[in-house]
Amino acid sequence: MDMKDNTIMLFVNDKEGNEKRPDYSGKALWNGEEISVSIWKNVSKAGNNYLSGQLQPPYNGSGKSSSSAGVSDDVPF
């Protein structure tokens, strides 16, 4: 699917056996840069339903975010 700039695309996650997994996950395209999005359903102490979320650079499979993929950890001193 092609995303337009400044939009979010989320999908429902099957949480069977993994309650820490987000309820929804997907991606956003913000100013031309792709961002991973995770959303959890919550209930406040007052009993009000709300959503909370996390934004981070997309996962590239190497254990590092894609934004740090080409960055060297070599220190010149």
Image (tube, grey):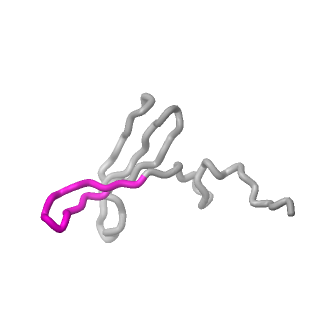
Of the 4 image quadrants, the one containing the C terminus is: bottom right
17 sits to left or right of 67: left
* Residue 73 image point, x, y percent: 75, 60
State the extent of the magenta-drawn residues as a range: 40-54
* Residue 14 image point, x, y percent: 30, 59
Q: Could you say which is closer to the camera, residue 17 or residue 44?
A: 44
Q: Specify the principal SS of the magenta part.
A: strand
Residue at 40% x, 54% y is 54
Query: Can see residue 2?
Result: no
34 sits to left or right of 74: left
Of the 4 image quadrants, the one containing the N terminus is: top left
**Extreme residue in the bottom direction:** 17
Residue at 30% x, 51% y is 12
Residue at 58% x, 53% y is 65
Q: Dividing the picture into quarters, in which one does residue 44 lie?
A: bottom left
* Residue 26 image point, x, y percent: 40, 47
**Extreme residue in the left direction:** 47
Residue 17, compared with residue 42, is above or below; it is below
Judge whether residue 67 is colored magenta: no
Q: Could you say which is closer to the camera, residue 9 or residue 50?
A: 50
